[in-house]
Image (cartoon, rainbow, N blue to C red):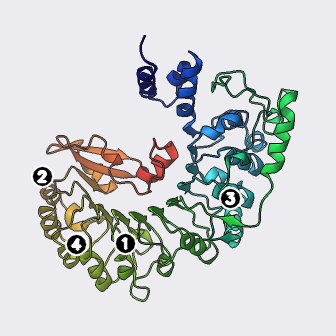
Amino acid sequence: MVPVELQLLVLDQLYFLDSDNSHRSLTNGTLVCRSYHAHLQPKIYHTLSVSSPQRYNRLLQQLYNMKLVKCLDLSAYTSMGSGWTDAKAKTVINAESLALLIRSCSQLETLLLGDAFGNIIDSSVLSFIFSRPKLSGLDLVACSSPMFAKSMAVTMGNLQTASNQVSESDEPRAYSSGTDPSVPQHLDEDSAISDDPTKSLCSSPSSSRRGSWDVACSSAITNDDVVTLPPSLDNLSLHMCSSLSESSVLVPLLSSLSALNKVDLSHTKITTSTLWNIAPDALTELSLRYCRGLTCCNAGLPYLLARFQKLTYLNLAMDPNLGGSRFCESCLAHLMSNITPQLKTLDISGSFELNDVHLNAIPQNHQLEKLSIAHCRGITLEAVLKLIKRSPRLSYINVAGVTSVEMTLPSLMRLLESQSLAVTEISDQVCNVLPSTVCGWQKSRHGRRCYLYSATGSAAKPELTHPYKLSIASDTLSPLAKYWSFAV
């Protein structure tokens, strides 16, 4: 007889048998016996991704297992291609059901919501989101509707600094107290669970469950005036949340989070002065991509960034089609000369004032591994080659729109001769005229981005080298997250 401990170690490997994240092998394992069920059930529900209204509707009928969920990914949700009309989907996907679903996840650590929920999220939903005591990651990608902006402003207006812990007893239950928790309950997407929205949320086929459903639904819509932020929240992404007010939302939110580790404020209305509200002690990744409100001299942007000594990722890219960055030469010089050895990724794309002097000002002890200088038109090929020569760790560089590098094929070949580089990102115009293979370098295209990568290098997937959007969840990215990170 094999010891139970060894059996459980073998069961843990079932996760790797399902490459499509279907958890089919894990689900089959729960059917063997009670001990296998108790061991595998938390793994099945650890990370849930919802991409259709049918899947969303099934979860609403299995709230008794939602307490096992650690990561809830709703960023890829869409009714397109599901067979449901928008009108039918809206009868299930609404603020009331979303609040109930989030409240059921009493152990929730990471939550990802996409633009499909922008017109659904209200202040009651936000209150339940921020009341999750273990919440450490929050991603609200592309939620930019006026309703969402207003709800965020109302919620931040009710914010208090003290933490309020929510007990597990606050968790809504889909079953009555008489349900035996030892009886295995299985997650089977092919089971005979009704997809009829009129039979979900606040209705149940069993009369013994109806009372507890009603209690859960009625309690989910109650909303306290006072909102508290979980002290564990250290990863925050407001990527493409362009409608959020700086004074009403960004300032109180950032100033109330004292242990931020990752912050993505790309495409928001943030200005340089508001960045002073971010605590510098633990911050390691900061994205300010396409934030048009950033200025340098009068707000002291270079001196502000010098506070963040632990940064490993910094994105200051600006849209070249909208005039590029507003950073002057002196501030760029101060910024580049104060790059710390901890910084591994720097994106300074769209800085028209960046020149050879700034590249030469990068300290000798820098440890840059990824550098994007796209559309920095004042840089010469010689300065780029000189920087690469003294950057042994540099494996990725973005030179799209750098005229001195992309002007002729020989100049581009001189760049590709660098031994340390594994991936070089180029502009679409240059990619169109190049053959599929150039002197041992292969051409690749992903969305709007184009790459040359070494066939002998270590970059198996060059399109996943440099993300434009910070990843909040450590698990597999949803299709929408991959799109915002690597395709645009």
Give the residue displayed 60% in from the left and 38% down from the top: 68
User: Circle 2: is it few (<14), some (14-19), or many (20+) Cα within 10 Å?
Assistant: some
Q: Secondary structure at mark 3?
A: helix
Viewer can see residue 407: no
From this view, report whether residue 434 is shown above or below residue 298.
Answer: above
Q: Which mark is residue 419?
A: 2
Q: Secondary structure at mark 1?
A: loop
| Res. 322 image quadrant | bottom left
Alpha carbon distance from label 3 to label 1: 29 Å
First reached walking from the N terminus: tag 1 or tag 2: 1
Confirm or deny contact between disc 4 and disc 3 (CB under 8 A). no
Which three-letter amino acid code belongs to the residue tagged 3?
Leu
First reached walking from the N terminus: tag 4 or tag 3: 3
Give the residue displayed 67% in from the left and 25% down from the top: 182
Q: Nearer the viewer, mark 1 or mark 2?
A: 1
| Res. 354 image quadrant | bottom left
Alpha carbon distance from label 4 to label 1: 27 Å
Check disc 1 and report the residue beneath it: 308
In the image, residue 188 lies at what x, y percent? 63, 24
Q: Secondary structure at mark 4?
A: loop
Which three-letter amino acid code belongs to the residue tagged 2?
Gln
Viewer can see residue 56: yes
User: Circle 1: is it few (<14), some (14-19), or many (20+) Cα within 10 Å?
Assistant: some
- Pick whichever, 317 or 341, lies toward us: 341
Alpha carbon distance from label 3 to label 2: 50 Å
Which three-letter amino acid code belongs to the residue tagged 1?
Phe
Q: Which mark is residue 379?
A: 4
